Amino acid sequence: MTKGHKNILGIFTFLPVILMLIYLAAIVVLVRDALVFKDEDMPFPILGDVLWLVIVALIMGLLSFGLMVYYIIHAINNPQIDNNEKIIWVLLFVIVSVFSFPIYWYLRILKRHEIVTMSAT
């Protein structure tokens, strides 16, 4: 894997975390708007906020699922990881996927090139 591919994968790896922060901010805005318009019947600003919540949630869900499939396949096919560690990584990907992706990317994809280069010299 080239350095450019690793960087692009890193961007996609951190994107669900950023989308989660955007999602939480959208929830705060939704609650704020709901408190401001509590006497009116379903105002349009709240519908816009709900639409943003749905869009961000869909993008985050699809991206997280795709990354989970990619990282599970990568961990299982990685010859530098023993079987016990493969099981641990797969469980981490399934249970805390969004937070385990950046850790795996850093330890097993980004740093792998440095380890291979250092051992070759």
Image (cartoon, helix red, strand yellow):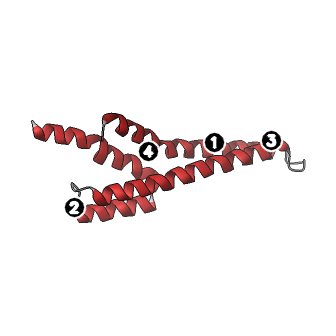
Label 1 vs 4, first from the N-terminus: 4
Does residue 120 appear left or right of residue 84 in this picture? left
> Contact (CB < 8 A) between labels 2 and 3?
no
Q: Residue at x 24, y 44 (%)?
A: 112
* Residue at numbered disc 4: 13
Between 107 and 36, the one lying in front of the other is: 107
Q: Nearer the viewer, mark 2 or mark 1?
A: 2
> Contact (CB < 8 A) between labels 1 and 3?
no
Label 2 vs 4, first from the N-terminus: 4
**What is the three-letter code of the residue carrying label 4?**
Thr
Q: Nearer the viewer, mark 4 or mark 3?
A: 4
- Badge 1 element: helix
Q: Marks 2 and 4, how far apart in space?
A: 23 Å
* Residue at numbered disc 1: 25
Outermost residue on the left side: it is 121
Q: Position of residue 24 (x, y in %)?
A: 61, 46
Q: Residue at x 90, y 50 (%)?
A: 41
Label 1 vs 3, first from the N-terminus: 1
Q: Nearer the viewer, mark 1 or mark 4?
A: 4
Label 4 vs 3, first from the N-terminus: 4
> Contact (CB < 8 A) between labels 4 and 3?
no
Outermost residue on the right side: it is 40
* Residue at numbered disc 2: 82
**What is the three-letter code of the residue carrying label 2?**
Asp
**What is the three-letter code of the residue carrying label 3?**
Pro
- Badge 3 element: helix
Q: Which mark is residue 45?
A: 3
- Badge 4 element: helix
Question: Would you identify the image quadrant in which residue 97 lies?
Answer: bottom left
Q: Marks 1 and 4, how far apart in space?
A: 20 Å
Q: Quadrant of the C terminus?
A: top left
Q: Residues within 10 Å of mark 4 (few under 14, many from 20)?
A: many
